[in-house]
Image (spheres, rainbow, N blue to C red):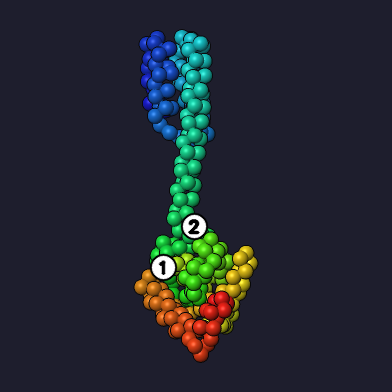
Amino acid sequence: MAWAVDVDFRHYRHDTQMLTFFTVSMMMICFVHFRPWIGSLLIAGAHLVLYLAVSAFDGAASLEPLNFLVLAVVSALANTILFHNQIFLFSRQDALYDRNQALREENRTDALTGIWNRLALESDAQKMDGRPLTAYMIDINYFKEINDRHGHLAGDELLRETTERLKKIFPGAHYYRYGGDEFLVLTYKPACENYGSSTYDFTDSKYGIHASLSIGSAQASPAGYDELFELISRADKSLYEVKRRTHSVEFGGHERRASGRL
């Protein structure tokens, strides 16, 4: 702006006002992006300095008021246009950021159940900080038979129902659909405050399907990606032992299977 004032003043001394008075200033306004209030202060300050300079030179005797008024109006208009252009660009950037965030969250979310998926788990695994953590691997018993008997729509509903049940069993935890009918729950609550059984029976509220869950657990204080997945692997082995026991003849697995109370 100081350079623009200097150029305008030198041209004023040579009686060439109209073109340079606003051309040079407009270049500064259009190509240097300030915050709107800073731009307004610079424009007003530049006009004041220019007027004081020509007043000190010859009392502003050669100043053409129309030229000066045109310069002031056009400069203010240019700043207004720039201001609205910045608002438009910022709004576009905000909209694009929000859209990217929504897509990122969509990619991290299981479409059927609405909880986190494996991609989210991979990301969250990078944030392990060494706090005591309990991992639960949960599996719906005889899920294939449920699908075969009642259809895939009923199976999908059962997966959603299981998700809601897990939120009640493990309140405040992190929930992931690990794959198929397997779920992972991670919680920082002490073990004594968590669900203590290795099984859970319920009846689906929409189709009336009798179902049960096998639950395996493990505890550790993972401080990194590999340590978390080692903990999950231990919980998965625990789940396998629970399923082996609950599906056995001694536990009545075959009778449950035959009766439809899976």
Determine which residue is flagged by label 1: 125
Q: Secondary structure at mark 2?
A: loop
Q: Quadrant of residue 124?
A: bottom left
Q: In front here: 21 or 244?
A: 244
Viewport quadrant of the N terminus: top left
The residue that appears at 47% across and 81% down in the rendered structure is 243
Could you say where residue 89 lies in the image, as x and y percent from the top left? 46, 36
Could you say where residue 252 lies in the image, as x and y percent from the top left? 53, 86
Please state which amino acid type lies under the numbered disc 2: Ala
The residue that appears at 39% across and 24% down in the rendered structure is 27
Viewport quadrant of the C terminus: bottom right
Determine which residue is flagged by label 2: 111
The residue that appears at 49% across and 43% down in the rendered structure is 94
The residue that appears at 47% across and 38% down in the rendered structure is 92
On screen, 243 above or below 91?
A: below
Q: Secondary structure at mark 1?
A: helix
Please state which amino acid type lies under the numbered disc 1: Ala
On screen, 96 above or below 161?
A: above
Say if residue 131 shows up in the picture.
Answer: no
State how far apart marks 2 and 1 are (Cα). Answer: 21 Å
Mark 1 crowd level (few <14, some 14–19, many ≥20, 10 Å Cα): some
Mark 2 crowd level (few <14, some 14–19, many ≥20, 10 Å Cα): few
Q: In front here: 45 or 197?
A: 197
On screen, 35 above or below 147?
A: above
Could you say where residue 85 lies in the image, as x and y percent from the top left? 48, 31
Asked whether disc 2 touches disc 1, contact meaning CB atoms under 8 Å apart, the reply is no
Q: In front here: 5 or 173?
A: 173
Q: In front here: 253 or 97?
A: 253
Which of pointers 2 and 1 lies earlier in the amino acid sequence? Answer: 2
Say if residue 208 shows up in the picture.
Answer: yes
Could you say where residue 191 lies in the image, as x and y percent from the top left? 54, 81
